């Protein structure tokens, strides 16, 4: 954090988060990550590196997988954001969440929200991805615990269960 | 009684739902009312005296809480083995990034600039940065000789072995520092109330280590210090001792300000300032018969501990005990030492010294094979420990393990012989050189020697008001599956369903001290105690007449509810007692080093691309005997995850140092394996069982870190015909070797004819 994002005046940013229309009053250069976590209390989005390398802060912005640590909130104006909190339907887990749980895709859990969103994004483009496509599709999200194999199994399993439509 | 066993089944991870939905609460997700944010001013030089601290202009310093060593109420140390590391440098600094001064402010955005504006003046002293510089003792930076600790392990008459040798094979092997790179950085929150005392919440492996350190640092009675582990986003040893440091810092700021204080490192600070795997140098000199049998040998194992002793003596101990590996040595002398340098203290990382000494040994075995002109598999087969033989510390192998069969099975699974032959033929015509390599090894579970006796761990199981059982341990969950497996064990012992058992949050006010969550001890040692404590609950209920000898889970819950209604909540505690056959002589370093060993044979296949000099691992077979596998999915996850870190250790992860300071402390330029980099990892278990562990389980977590690096570098040698004896092995190292930029000769270990 070189320059304080608080040096500029606050402004109003309307956007949609997990299907809900919201307006936050914040500094325009505030990171989307911080706005989600601190203004909106959506702490499922995690910070791992703060420089767009690890993917722990991945969210979907207008259907595109982005690192929310690299997005000034101004850029998210009027966007449609999906975070990990937006995946389950009430008590019912999304097929990807269920498959991660069953296949051992989550260990310490810190990369898990971003990893699941990356997988969600992948399945939305390729509902039945090949192993190579899964490897490629998740390669922007680092996991230090699992060695990835059980994550691959989880994504394949969720694909088989129709998670990607 | 139900015959459906719970151990051995892959039940859902206990806290898994919270993790996949983003509801799990890590320390950075917690905000307390009125909370301040803390930051650390660190040394910018590796060695010297601080002569002046100036608070620069342009900062409203009265809004900041400032803490120096003068503010420490108790002893200025991180309590661990010898309490030698200060919490805040007081006058002198011994490494870059050493903490000197702490700042706190309600607005975290004001902190980075304030840290920058604290100017430090020093009287710099000469500094040392390598094992060799430390050995030369041109500067003495610790004690009288720069040696934190040394050990000698001796067995048989080594000096007589040289006479009998047909070959004497020598080699020197090195491993670099490795960053744990848990994805959640270190972080804590501390809160202080003069009446209530001090509470610290944070990301950690060992709440009672932090507790012990805070009591000493803050000069508070033990009952007025409370430490609570929050959900922890990876640790791998990296959160064994360092949380005591950051907790101490937050506590000092909280005590001075009277407000809660959060310190959350960013990635660069975490990588620059916290512990890493000890760099190592191992020298082998081995007497070998003409048929490839080891007759005796000397091993010199040296690790770079950084500026303070911290955990180095125990890392050294494990490394030294594992230095002879899974082989029978009729005679051996192992000399081990941990040295001081002016770098941040090195610490625990999965494997804890063993990956270093086993890298050396498993490379050296291939060297011996070449000298004797037998295959790498054959040299191992001829020397693997057999039942009834003794290890280097004189511990008799009593387990029913047949390592020759384990080797055979791994070779079959990888199609070793055929692949090796095929590669040798095809490599002649291709710029893609393929190779295959083996490592056979062991890993001791639990604390070394008398360690478990000193820990004297206590575990509780509680009968609750709803009729369920609750496990009380300070053993922490940081991804490995502690919560899940300990609940499985309790459920199995009580004949309950998995859903009928819960586990308390590790909170020093609520749970007994079941020891640190390290050393692959949780399932074997703590798990066995959970099993005993659970039986105590059952006995209480049956003795009260409320429960029959045989019962259903429903009957148990009804009896438990009735008992609690009449007598209140009840607990059963179990304390560790060392089995009688575990005898260890700390002075001579002889005896039973570990209650059990896990055994493994790993085989790696690689391709070296002579256009890019890149090494890719194409296939990986991991066969191990870890006792009874209590949860197949979690166990497999431990093995694959460890192998991924081992591949990083071998081929990617290089800490670039400049004057004792990490230069590449970012994920952008410290490279760990991504999903695109890893081979298919084929995991296989043998399950022989083990009398010391819960339901026959042994330790599993660290084992998979030991084998990948030597198996891979052995495979690279098989592909290229050039031995590389130092890791990490990066493409530029291969380029240098193949283009003659490095003297080829220097790569080869010395070899002499014997008799």
Image: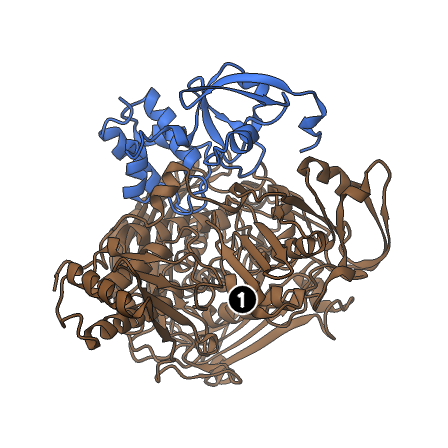
The percent coordinates of residue B559 (x first, y second) are 20, 65
Quarter of the rendering occupied by the N terminus of chain B: bottom left
Identify by letter the chain in blue. Answer: A
Quarter assignment of residue B467: bottom left
Name the one closer to the observer, B298 or B551.
Answer: B551
Name the one closer to the observer, A3 or B409.
Answer: A3
- In the picture provided, is B490 more to the left or to the right than B669? left
Residue designated by label 1:
B315
Name the one closer to the observer, A162 or B686.
Answer: A162
Quarter assignment of residue B452: bottom left
- In the picture provided, is B578 more to the left or to the right than B516? left
The percent coordinates of residue B654 (x first, y second) are 57, 47
The percent coordinates of residue A21 (x first, y second) are 45, 18
Q: How many marks?
A: 1
Q: Is residue A163 visible?
A: yes
Colour in which chain B is drawn: brown
Q: In the rendered view, would you say B413 is above or below B583? A: above
Label 1: element kind:
helix
- In the picture provided, is B449 more to the left or to the right than B579? right
Name the one closer to the observer, B261 or A121.
Answer: B261
- The colour scheme applied to this rendered structure is by chain
Q: In the rendered view, would you say B214 is above or below B329? A: above
Chain letter of mark 1 equals: B
Q: In the rendered view, would you say B257 is above or below B698? A: above
The percent coordinates of residue B209 (x first, y second) are 54, 65
Q: Is residue B339 visible?
A: no
């Amino acid at each position: 954090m070189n320059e304080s994002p608080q040096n500029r005046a606050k402004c109003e940013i309307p956007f949609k988060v997990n299907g809900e229309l919201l307006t936050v009053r914040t500094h325009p250069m505030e990171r989307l990550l911080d706005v989600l976590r601190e203004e909106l209390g959506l702490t499922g989005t995690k910070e791992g590196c703060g420089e767009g390398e690890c993917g722990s802060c991945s969210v979907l912005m207008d259907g595109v997988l982005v690192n929310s640590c690299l997005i000034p909130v101004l850029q998210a104006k009027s966007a449609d954001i999906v975070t990990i909190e937006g995946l389950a339907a009430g008590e019912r887990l999304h097929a990807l969440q269920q498959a991660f749980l069953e296949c051992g895709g989550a260990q310490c859990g810190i990369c898990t929200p971003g990893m699941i969103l990356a997988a969600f994004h992948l399945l939305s483009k390729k509902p039945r991805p090949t192993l190579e496509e899964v490897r490629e599709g998740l390669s922007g999200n680092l996991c230090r615990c699992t060695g990835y194999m059980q994550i691959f199994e989880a994504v394949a399993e969720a694909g088989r269960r129709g998670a990607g439509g | 009684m139900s015959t459906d066993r719970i151990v051995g089944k892959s039940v859902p991870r206990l806290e898994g739902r919270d993790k996949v939905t983003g509801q799990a609460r890590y320390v950075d997700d917690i905000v307390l009312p009125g909370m301040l944010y803390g930051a650390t001013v660190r040394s910018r030089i590796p060695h010297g005296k601080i002569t002046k601290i100036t608070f620069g202009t342009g900062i409203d310093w009265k809004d900041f809480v400032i803490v120096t060593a003068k503010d420490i109420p108790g002893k200025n140390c991180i309590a661990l083995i010898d309490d030698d590391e200060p919490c805040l440098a007081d006058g002198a600094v011994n490494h870059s990034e050493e903490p000197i001064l702490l700042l706190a402010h309600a607005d975290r955005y004001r902190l980075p600039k304030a840290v920058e504006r604290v100017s430090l003046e020093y009287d710099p002293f000469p500094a040392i940065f390598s094992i060799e510089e430390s050995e030369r003792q041109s500067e003495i930076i610790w004690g009288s000789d720069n040696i934190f600790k040394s050990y000698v392990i001796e067995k048989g008459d080594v000096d007589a072995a040289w006479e009998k040798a047909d070959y004497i094979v020598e080699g020197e092997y090195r491993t670099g520092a490795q960053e744990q790179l848990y994805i959640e950085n270190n972080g804590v929150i501390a809160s202080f109330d003069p009446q209530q005392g001090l509470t610290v919440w944070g990301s950690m492996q060992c709440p009672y280590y932090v507790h012990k350190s805070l009591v000493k640092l803050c000069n508070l009675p033990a009952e007025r210090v409370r430490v609570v582990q929050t959900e922890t986003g990876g640790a791998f040893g990296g959160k064994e001792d360092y949380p005591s440091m950051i907790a101490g810092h937050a506590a000092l700021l909280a005590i001075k300000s009277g407000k809660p204080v959060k310190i959350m490192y960013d990635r660069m600070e975490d990588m620059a300032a916290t512990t890493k795997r000890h760099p190592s140098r191992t020298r082998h000199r081995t007497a070998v018969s003409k048929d490839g049998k080891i007759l005796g040998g000397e091993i010199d194992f040296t690790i770079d501990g950084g500026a303070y002793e911290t955990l180095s003596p125990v890392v050294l101990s494990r490394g030294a005990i594992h230095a002879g590996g899974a082989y029978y040595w009729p005679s051996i002398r192992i000399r081990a030492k941990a040295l001081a340098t002016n770098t941040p203290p090195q610490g625990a990382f999965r494997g804890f010294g063993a990956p270093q000494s086993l890298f050396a040994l498993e490379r050296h075995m291939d060297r011996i094979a070449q000298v004797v002109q037998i295959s790498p598999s054959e040299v191992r087969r001829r020397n693997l420990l057999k039942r009834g033989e003794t290890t280097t510390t004189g511990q008799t192998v009593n387990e029913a393990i047949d390592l020759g069969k384990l080797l055979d099975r791994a070779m079959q699974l990888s199609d070793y012989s055929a692949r090796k032959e095929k590669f040798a033929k095809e490599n002649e015509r291709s710029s893609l050189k393929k190779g295959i390599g083996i490592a056979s090894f062991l890993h001791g579970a639990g604390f070394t020697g008398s360690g478990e006796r000193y820990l004297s761990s206590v575990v509780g199981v509680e009968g609750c008001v709803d009729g369920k059982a609750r496990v009380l341990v300070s053993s922490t969950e940081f991804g490995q599956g502690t919560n899940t497996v300990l609940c499985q064990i309790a459920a199995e012992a009580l004949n309950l369903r998995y859903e009928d058992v819960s586990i308390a949050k590790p909170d020093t006010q609520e749970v007994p001290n079941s020891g640190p969550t390290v050393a692959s001890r949780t399932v074997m040692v703590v798990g066995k105690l959970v099993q005993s404590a659970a039986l105590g609950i059952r006995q209480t209920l049956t003795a009260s007449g409320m429960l029959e000898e045989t019962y259903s889970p429903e009957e148990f819950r009804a009896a438990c509810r009735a008992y609690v209604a009449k007598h209140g909540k009840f607990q059963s505690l179990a304390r560790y007692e060392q089995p009688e056959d575990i005898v260890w002589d700390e002075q001579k370093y002889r005896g039973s080093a570990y209650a059990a060993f896990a055994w493994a044979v790993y085989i790696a296949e690689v391709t070296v691309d002579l256009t890019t000099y890149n090494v890719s691992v194409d296939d990986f077979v991991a066969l191990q005997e870890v006792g009874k596998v209590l949860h197949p999915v979690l166990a497999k996850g431990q093995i694959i995850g460890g192998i991924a870190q081992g591949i990083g250790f071998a081929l990617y992860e290089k800490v670039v140092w400049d004057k004792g300071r990490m230069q590449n402390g970012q994920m952008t330029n410290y490279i760990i394996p991504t999903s695109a980099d890893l081979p298919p990892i084929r995991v296989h278990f043998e399950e022989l069982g083990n009398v010391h562990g819960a339901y026959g389980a042994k330790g599993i977590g660290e084992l998979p870190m030991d084998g990948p690096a030597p198996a891979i570098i052995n495979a690279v040698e098989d592909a290229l015909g050039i031995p590389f004896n130092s890791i990490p092995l990066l493409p530029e190292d291969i380029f240098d070797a193949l283009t003659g930029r490095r003297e080829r000769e220097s790569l080869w270990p010395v070899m002499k004819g014997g008799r």
